[in-house]
Amino acid sequence: MDGAARRLYISRSSHVMVMDLDSDKVVDDIPNTQGVHGIAVAPELNRGFTSNGKADTSTIFDLKTLKVLDEVKTGENPDSIIYDPVSKKVFTFNGRSKDSTVFDAVSGKVERTIPLGGKPEFAVTDGKGKVYVNIEDTRQVVEIDSLKARETRMFSLNPCEEPTGMGLDSEHHRAFSGCHNKIMTILDTTAGRVIATVPIGANVDGNGFDAGTGLAFSRTATAPSP
């Protein structure tokens, strides 16, 4: 969601629907984004970015006109994508090649490919120069220095299995990962260890954190057992 522009971007496999949040109407469409998974926005740069999983590319588009500006070659099967405002870089997390493609948000120039040692799922930025990404098949979180575009630390998420979505409380240094063994892990990113788990439902996909309420959320297909 682009809160400033009151627009919601919805990935639809081969194109991106653009909805006006005030009228609840679809106002435009971004075509030719084959296998699109994620959309990231950089309002201060008037740029938006998609991760095109089937094309192994990222599309750069103008936030005001929605016109395509450029296309960047990424690793294989880019899934999650984020824009980091500190470094002004875009990070795509590529499931098949198990790495992250890092490119300049303005020029589109690829700066580095970061090997991750496993299949990345979802990533978040703390807005202070750190990026965190769940690694699904190794049950870990990788920490990345966004300015240097390099891995700095790796944390175990045991007893988590197949972490997917992630939320981040950057003020209190807590990352919340949804796991397929029906728990949410709470990772202390300063200490580098899981400090608690809570029960969630089955088939988790999305996870999030709301700074206004201090609540963490997991989106699952079923409710947790009493």
Image (tube, rainbow, N blue to C red):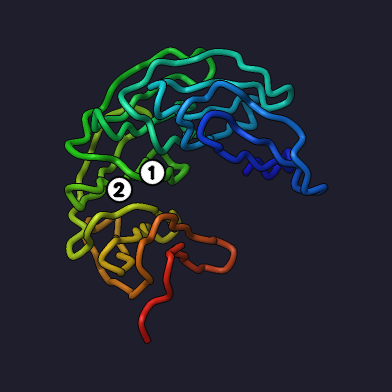
Q: Residues within 10 Å of mark 2 (few under 14, many from 20)?
A: many
Which quarter of the figure has residue 172? Answer: bottom left
Which quarter of the figure has residue 222? Answer: bottom left
Inspect the image, locate mark 2, and give the three-letter code of the amino acid beneath it.
Asn
At mark 1, the secondary structure is strand
Q: Earlier in the sequence, mark 1 or mark 2?
A: 1
Residue at the image point whose x is 55% and y is 21% from the top: 32
Residue at the image point whose x is 37% and y is 41% from the top: 130
What count of labels does the image hold? 2
At mark 2, the secondary structure is strand
Residue at the image point whose x is 38% and y is 60% from the top: 204
Between 125 and 157, the one lying in front of the other is 157
Q: Are marks 1 and 2 in contact (CB under 8 Å)?
A: yes
Query: Is 147 located above or below residue 215 in the figure?
Result: above
Between 172 and 133, the one lying in front of the other is 133
Which quarter of the figure has residue 109? Answer: top left
Name the quarter where the C terminus is drawn.
Answer: bottom left
Inspect the image, locate mark 1, and give the three-letter code of the amino acid beneath it.
Ala
Outermost residue on the right side: it is 23
Residue 34's x, y, as percent? 48, 25
Residue 208's x, y, as percent? 47, 58
Residue to which mark 2 is pinned: 134
Residue 116's x, y, as percent? 22, 35
Query: Is 12 located above or below residue 216 in the figure?
Result: above
Residue to which mark 1 is pinned: 123
Q: Residues within 10 Å of mark 1 (few under 14, many from 20)?
A: many
